[in-house]
Image (cartoon, rainbow, N blue to C red):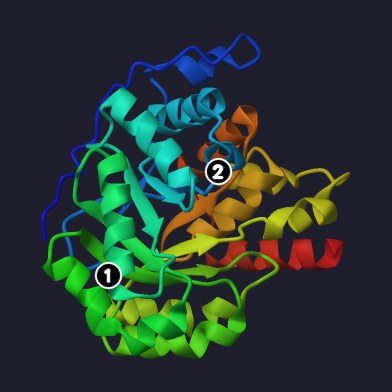
C-alpha cells in the first residue's frame, strides 16, 4: 500500500492573534506521538481533529488557525464531512499540506456511482490526490455492498476504507466486518464514561489488525459537566497531564488498540490543550483503573 506520509518538519504557522500563547507559534513544539496503522509501515499521530464547526460553516480564518496549530504539532488526521471537507481542502491547497494531512472523508451517498461522483469532487478539493480514508456511517449499507467499497481501493480512489458509529447497537456489525477483513479502520466511541467498546470491539480490532479511531472523547461536553469545579488530582502529573481534557484523552490513548482520538473544537486555546495529550507519558493499567474510579465517584 502506498505511503506518502513523510511529515513536514516545519509548517510556517499563520498569525494566530495576540490572544494565543506564544508557545503555540513555536517551531520547537514537541511533536505528537505516532502509532503504526496495523499491517502497514505508515504511522498516524495519535490526536486528530474532528469535523469542527468552523469547517462546516466555511469559516476560513478560524479554520486556518486551527489547522496551523494542529500542523505545528505534527497533526495529520482530520475527520471531515459535508461542507467541512471543502473548507479543509481549501486550506490544504493553500498550505501545500497534502503530504502532512491525512483527511478521512465520509461517503454519504447510497448508490455506488453517486459515491464515486461525490468522492471525485472531494479528491479535486484536496488537490486531486488519492484519498487517504473513506468511511461511512451507513454501516448496514456497507455490509450489503462491501465489494463496492473494496472497489474504491482497487480503483485507486482511496487507500483505506472503514465505518464510523457511536452507538453500542452497532458493535456486533463492526465486529462482523472486522472478522471478515472488510475494513481497514473502525471509528467508535470510547471514553471514561463510555467504556463498552473495550469489551469486544477494541480487543478484536487489535487481534484482526484494524485501526481504531475514537469519537466522543468528551461525550459531546458531558464529561466537563461532571468534572467542572473539581481540582485535577495531583497524581495526574505522573503521566504529564495538565487539564481535565487531557485526563480524558490520555485515558483513551493509553489503550493499546487505539490509533487516534478525534478532538473537535472551534476554540484555538482548547485545540492547544487537546494536542498536549498527545505528548509525554501515558497512564499505565493501574493508573487507568484509578482514573475510572475517580470520575465515576465524581459522577
Residue 165: give x, y in percent of width and height. Answer: 53, 72
Badge 1 element = helix
Residue 48 location in percent, x, y?
Answer: 45, 47
Q: In this view, does 278 lie above or below 273?
A: below
* 252 up-or-down from 99: above or below: below
> Can you tell which mark lies on residue 56?
2
Local crowd at mark 2 within 10 Å, few (<14), some, or many (≥20)? some
Q: Which mark is residue 113?
A: 1
Residue 112 percent coordinates (x, y): 29, 74
Q: What is the quadrant of the N terminus in the image?
A: bottom left
Q: Are marks 1 and 2 in contact (CB under 8 Å)?
A: no
Q: Nearer the viewer, residue 232 or 193?
A: 193
Residue for point 46% across, 76% down = 138
- Residue farthest to the top, as pictured: 18
Which of the 4 image quarters holds residue 118?
A: bottom left
Category of crowding for the residue at label 1, using alpha-carbon neighbours closer than 10 angstroms: few (below 14), some (14–19), many (at least 20): few
Q: Which of 141 and 173 is in front in this view?
A: 141
Image side of residue 2 versus residue 207, left or right: left
Residue shown at 63%/28% (left/top)? 269
Of 229 and 150, nearer the camera is: 150
Res 267 quadrant in image: top right
As drawn, the residue found furthest toward the right would be 229
Badge nearest the viewer, 1 or 2: 1
Amino acid at each position: 500500500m502506498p505511503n506518502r506520509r513523510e511529515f513536514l518538519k516545519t509548517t510556517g504557522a499563520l498569525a494566530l492573534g495576540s490572544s494565543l500563547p506564544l508557545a503555540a507559534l513555536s517551531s520547537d513544539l514537541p511533536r505528537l506521538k505516532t502509532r503504526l496503522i496495523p499491517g502497514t509501515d505508515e504511522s498516524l499521530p495519535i490526536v486528530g481533529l474532528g469535523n469542527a464547526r468552523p469547517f462546516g460553516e466555511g469559516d476560513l480564518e478560524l479554520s486556518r488557525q486551527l489547522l496551523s496549530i494542529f500542523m505545528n504539532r505534527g497533526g495529520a488526521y482530520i475527520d471531515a464531512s459535508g461542507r467541512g471537507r471543502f473548507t479543509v481542502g481549501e486550506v490544504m491547497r493553500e498550505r501545500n499540506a497534502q503530504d502532512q494531512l491525512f483527511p478521512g472523508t465520509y461517503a454519504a451517498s447510497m448508490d455506488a456511482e453517486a459515491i464515486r461522483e461525490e468522492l471525485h469532487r472531494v479528491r479535486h478539493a484536496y488537490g486531486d490526490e488519492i484519498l487517504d480514508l473513506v468511511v461511512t456511517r451507513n454501516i448496514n449499507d456497507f455490509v450489503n455492498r462491501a465489494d463496492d467499497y473494496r472497489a474504491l481501493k482497487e480503483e485507486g480512489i482511496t487507500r483505506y476504507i472503514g465505518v464510523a458509529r457511536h452507538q453500542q447497537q452497532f458493535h456486533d456489525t463492526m465486529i462482523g466486518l472486522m472478522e471478515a477483513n472488510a475494513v481497514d479502520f473502525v471509528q467508535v466511541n470510547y471514553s471514561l464514561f463510555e467504556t463498552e467498546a473495550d469489551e469486544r470491539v477494541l480487543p478484536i480490532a487489535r487481534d484482526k489488525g484494524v485501526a481504531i479511531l475514537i469519537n466522543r472523547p468528551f461525550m459531546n461536553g458531558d464529561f466537563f459537566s461532571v468534572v467542572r469545579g473539581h481540582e485535577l488530582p495531583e497524581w495526574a502529573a505522573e503521566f504529564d497531564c495538565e487539564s481535565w481534557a487531557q485526563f480524558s484523552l490520555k485515558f483513551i490513548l493509553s489503550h493499546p488498540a487505539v490509533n487516534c482520538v478525534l478532538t473537535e473544537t472551534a476554540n484555538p486555546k482548547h485545540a492547544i490543550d487537546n494536542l498536549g495529550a498527545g505528548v509525554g507519558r501515558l497512564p499505565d493499567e493501574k493508573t487507568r483503573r484509578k482514573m475510572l474510579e475517580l470520575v465515576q465517584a465524581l459522577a
